Amino acid sequence: MAIELFITFVRIGLFTFGGGYAMISLIQDICVEKKKWISHDEMMDITVIAESTPGPIAINCATFVGYKRRGMVGAIAATTGVVLPSFIIIYLISLFLDRFLEIAWIASAFRGIKIAVGILILDAALKMIRKMPKKLFQITVLIIAFLTMMAVNLFSIKVSSITLMVTAGLCSLIAFYVKNSMRTEGRSL
């Protein structure tokens, strides 16, 4: 089973360009839809936790999936699998090509890859939105976060993503507190 985790995450690491956010869609497709190693809710939780903990998001996701499947051995296998292809490719590039990105056809390929990466990130976001519980609070947070990020990008406002995550976390804690206090009083939100 650890070998299967390793091979699966080598494939994910080898065939996904654009970093961790682009890998989320592929991890979700393979680990949730095809292999059913984790549920969709677990994938959403993993994504949130992996984003808010130190380290690359894809590595954190791989580590969690591996740990869930086979404990520490699975975590090591999945993490090694997702990291190894990038490490080998970058190492080989550094050995043989000093000016790798100055080669015209490689630079053109990377411009095309940028578009594919954007599509992969959008695909992962849309899948998560479709599966998200359709409750007023979640929809409100989604809309406010989207509008805030659009304003930040359109008007070149400098806002730390950490500030946005902490704010969203505080809103969730307040909503949790209000919901629990209403439950104890016998009312519902």
Image: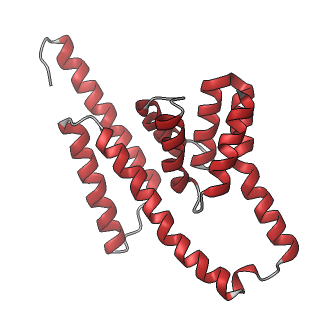
Q: In the shown orientation, is residue 175 left or right of residue 119?
A: left
Q: In the shown orientation, is residue 21 left or right of residue 84?
A: left
User: How is the protein colored in the picture?
Assistant: secondary structure
Residue with the most extreme front position: 34
Q: Quadrant of residue 158 in the image? A: bottom left
Q: Considering the image in quadrants, where does the N terminus appear?
A: top right
Of residue 145 and residue 28, the one placed in the foreground of this image is 28
Q: Is residue 52 in view?
A: no
Identify whether 142 is placed above or below 153: above
Measuring 36% from the left and 70% from the top, which residue is drawn there?
153
Identify whether 122 is placed above or below 131: below
Where residue 63 appears, as percent x and y from the top left, is 64, 36
Measuring 34% from the left and 61% from the top, which residue is drawn there?
149
Identify whether 61 is placed above or below 11: above
Where residue 143 appears, as percent x and y from the top left, is 24, 52
Q: In the shown orientation, is residue 97 left or right of residue 86?
A: right
Residue with the most extreme right position: 95
